[in-house]
Image: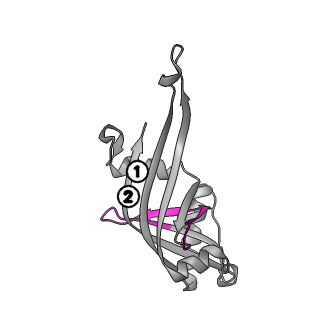
């Protein structure tokens, strides 16, 4: 990372960014050009501080096709956007943000109980004060993708 003064290494600060972000952008290999798609997500942090993302969607489509061909992907998420202004100089304008960029490997979760657990995490992220129940029938028509993060950098300005 070029700007070490903006680097975030504390896992609690990383978690805070994840808790304030609604969308993760996934970049997958699609031949000559990458394919990028924004999706909602949830996450968990393993005891060794490894990040795991979960997303869901239709069982068919470009994203699923590309990840079946090559499960390696890159991701980006950002939050806390705010314009920084200056009364004197345009060159002193900047933008405040917090972001995480990295890469990982995707796997498809097929087992109904594991899909239900992922859906519980997703709903806990967006509606933490509510309780939901899912059946195997509810999760059968959708796919859940687990992304094991291999490396990431986080920064804020």
Earlier along the polypeptide chain: callout 1 or callout 2?
1
Q: Is residue 139 within the magenta segment?
A: no
Residue 20, x across and y down, in percent: 53, 47
* In this picture, residue 155 sits left or right of residue 96: left
Residue 29, x across and y down, in percent: 52, 71
Secondary structure category for the residue under label 1: helix
118 or 50, which is in the foreground? Answer: 50
Who's the residue at 33% across and 40% down the image? 3
Who's the residue at 54% across and 77% down the image? 67
Is the residue marked by circle 1 packed among few (<14), some (14-19), or many (20+) residues within 10 Å? some
Which labelled disc corresponds to residue 113? none
Mark in the foreground, 1 or 2: 2
Who's the residue at 57% across and 68% down the image? 55
Is the residue marked by circle 2 packed among few (<14), some (14-19), or many (20+) residues within 10 Å? some
Residue 143 in view (yes/no): yes
Which labelled disc corresponds to residue 14? 1
Which labelled disc corresponds to residue 152? 2
* In this picture, residue 152 sits left or right of residue 119: left
* Above-or-below relation of 149 to 157: below
Secondary structure category for the residue under label 2: strand
Residue 54, x across and y down, in percent: 52, 68
Residue 123, x across and y down, in percent: 61, 63
Residue 114 in view (yes/no): no
74 or 156, which is in the foreground? Answer: 74
Q: Are marks 1 and 2 in contact (CB under 8 Å)?
A: yes
125 or 28, which is in the foreground? Answer: 28
Residue lying at the far top of the rendered structure = 88
Who's the residue at 60% across and 77% down the image? 64
Residue range highlighted in magenta: 30-53
């Amino acid at each position: 990372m070029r700007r070490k003064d903006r680097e975030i290494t504390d896992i609690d600060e990383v978690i805070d960014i994840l808790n304030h972000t609604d969308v993760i952008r996934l970049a997958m290999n699609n031949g000559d050009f990458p394919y990028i798609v924004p999706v909602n997500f949830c996450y968990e942090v393993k005891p060794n501080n490894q990040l795991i993302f979960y997303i869901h969607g239709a069982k068919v489509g470009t994203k699923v096709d590309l990840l079946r061909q090559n499960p390696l992907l890159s991701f980006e998420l950002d939050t806390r956007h705010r314009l920084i202004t200056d009364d004197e100089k345009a060159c002193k304008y900047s933008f405040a943000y917090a972001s995480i960029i990295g890469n990982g490997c995707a796997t498809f979760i097929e087992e109904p109980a594991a899909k239900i657990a992922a859906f519980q995490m997703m709903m806990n992220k967006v509606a933490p004060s509510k309780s939901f129940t899912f059946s195997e029938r509810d999760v059968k028509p959708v796919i859940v993708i687990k992304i094991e993060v291999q490396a990431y950098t986080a920064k804020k300005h």
